[in-house]
Image (cartoon, rainbow, N blue to C red):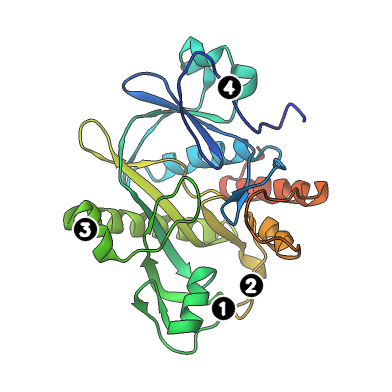
Amino acid sequence: MSAATLLQTSLDELPLLRRGKVRDVYSVDDDRLLIVATDRISAFDCVLPTPIERKGEVLTALSEFWFGKLGHVVANHLISTNIEDMPESIRSHSETLAHRAMLVKRSEVFPVECVVRGYLVGSGWKDYKRTGDVCGHKLPEGLRESDQLPQPLFTPSTKAEEGHDENITEDQVKALIGEENTKLLRDASLRLYSEARDYARQRGIIIADTKFEFGRDKNGTLTLIDEVLTPDSSRFWPADAYEPGRSQPSFDKQFVRDYLETLDWDKKPPAPAIPPEVAKATTARYLEAYRLLTGKEL
C-alpha cells in the first residue's frame, strides 16, 4: 500500500469514537473532534477491501472548499484542516493525517440525512417508474431518467452507520425532531443545494443530488457537519455530456457501482475487491471533480 493510501487509522493518544464506512472519528476534548477521511470506499452499503488512492484527500479538501463557500448560508463545524493548527497528539501523526484530517467543533447531531434531489435518478427514478412519486412528492407524468426535476426535492432519510439509510417522510422527520427543526433543516438544505448547483453548473458539473448532515453547537446554533458536496455524498455529472433519458457518466463512485453490477455478487458482505484499473479510474474522477469545482489541482 502506498504512502498516498490510507485504509484505517490508529491514534493511541485519542479515543476512537466510531469507525464509519469512510471516516474515523476521534475525541480530542469536550469541545472538539478529529475526523479523518480514509481511502475506504463503500458501495451497496458494504465497505470494499480495495482503497481508492487519495480519496480521503479529495473529500477533505472539497469539504473545506464548500464549508468556506457556503458559510454565509449556515454555520459549519470546521475549525481547521491544517495539522500545524492542531494539538500535539494529532501533529505527531502528521505523516498519516496530513490533507485528510479535519478538527471540528462537537455538535448535537440531528438523526436525519437531509437529501436533496435535483434530477430524477437512482432510487428516485425507480420509485417514479413504480408509483409516479419520489419519496411522497407527486411528479408530472412522462419524465425520463436523469431529467431535471421541476424544483429540487427535500427527501430525508434515516442515518445508518451500517446498512442502508431508509427514506422517510417529512411527517416522520417532524415526529423525530419537531416541526420547527424540520423546517429549519429543509430550508437550509434546499438553499445550500441551490447555491452549490448554480455554482457547479458554471464550472461544468451538474450536482444531481446530495445529502447534508446538521447538528447544533453548544450555543444552539444550527451547524452543517460531516462532509459536504463531495463525490461520496453527491452525484456529480459532467455538464457537457448530459443527456436525459439514460444514466449519466459521473465523477463520483457510480463508476465503482457500475463495475460491481457486472459481478455475480449478492451485495452482501464481504464485498469483492475491485481491479487496479477501476480503482485508478475512480481516483482520476475524484481529482477531476475537485479540479473543476475549485479551479485548482490537488
Q: Nearer the viewer, residue 132 or 78?
A: 132
Q: Which disc number belongs to residue 247?
A: 2
Above-or-below relation of 128 to 78: below
Q: The residue tagged with tag 2: helix, strand or loop?
A: loop
Give the alpha-carbon distance from disc 3 to disc 1, as whole Å: 32 Å
Disc 3/disc 4 C-alpha distance (Å): 38 Å
Location of the N terminus (image quadrant):
top right
The quadrant holding residue 29 is top left
Tag nearer the camera, 3 or 1: 3
Q: Residue at x 37, y 34 (%)?
A: 77
Lower position in the chain sequence, tag 3 or tag 4: 4
Check disc 2 and give the amino acid type.
Ser
- Residue at the location (22% across, 59% down)? 174
Q: Is disc 1 placed on a helix, strand or loop?
A: loop
Q: Which residue is mark 1?
A: 145
- Splitting the image into 4 quarters, where does residue 79 fall? top left
Q: Which mark identifies residue 93? A: none
- Look at the picture and state if 155 lies above or below 139: above
The residues bearing labels 4 and 2 have C-alpha atoms spaced at a distance of: 39 Å
Q: Which amino acid does the dot numbered 4 rest on?
A: Ser
Residue 30, given in percent of the width and then of the height, sits at 31, 20
- Residue at figure coordinates x 47%, y 80% from the top left: 128
| Residue at mark 4 | 10
Badge nearest the viewer, 4 or 2: 4
Q: Dots 3 and 2: beta carbons under 8 Å? A: no
